[in-house]
Amino acid sequence: MNFLELAKNRFSSRSYKPQPVERETIKNVLEAARIAPSAANKQPWHFLVFTRQESLKKAYQLYHREWFKQSPVVILACAEKQNAWTRAEDNKNHADIDLAIAIDHITLQATELGLATCWICNFFVEKTKQMLNLPQNLEPIALLTLAYPADSPNVERHKTLRKKLEEIVSWENFD
């Protein structure tokens, strides 16, 4: 599948088959994050992977939707802001940007492997820090599900729900 087909087939799945995801497959998905670009190659990220039942029970408490509890794999994506590149002019820390790129690599690699993901930012951040006893240097940014989908992408959404190219691009005439 070419890249645009792959990107169009990636979707936020909220229905999963009760099939475990093989550890080698999970590693393959995480490898895509490992090789993601980051500002000044700082790689300011850390991923916590939940696959065992007792760990998943904890992970399922971090988000309030029932469908989330179907996922046999949950990944907590954390930023290491103190290790990120910071732009000198305005002191902008790029950890969130770098982590977003790595997460996107995960979602696209998962899609290529026939898996589904859902990128979740609306989770219980403080509860996550406390329940998992996260060290100060790890800031939880997003939860990701990783599973074999029981639903399928609606590729028509790219035609109807996405803005037209003319709405998001300006060509050199900035007057």
Image (cartoon, grey):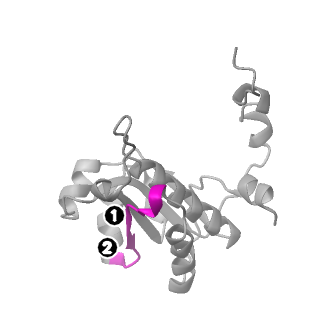
State the image coordinates of residue 106 (x, y, percent, origin top left).
Answer: 56, 64
Q: Callout 1 environment at 10 Å: few (<14), some (14 to 19), or many (20+)?
A: many
Q: Report which residue position mark 2 lands on.
A: 55
What amino acid type is highlighted by mark number 1?
Ala
Q: Which residues are magenta?
A: 39-53
Looking at the figure, which quarter contains the N terminus? Answer: bottom right
Q: Report which residue position mark 1 lands on.
A: 59
Q: Is residue 86 left or right of residue 118?
A: left
Looking at the figure, which quarter contains the C terminus? Answer: top right
Q: Is residue 175 left or right of residue 66?
A: right
Which residue is nearer to you in this view: 152 or 76? 76
What amino acid type is highlighted by mark number 2?
Ser
Residue that extends furthest to the front in the rendered view of this protein: 89
Judged from the image, the secondary structure of the residue bearing numbered disc 1 is helix
How much space separates mark 2 and mark 1, taking CA atoms?
A: 6 Å
Rendering quarter of residue 112: bottom right
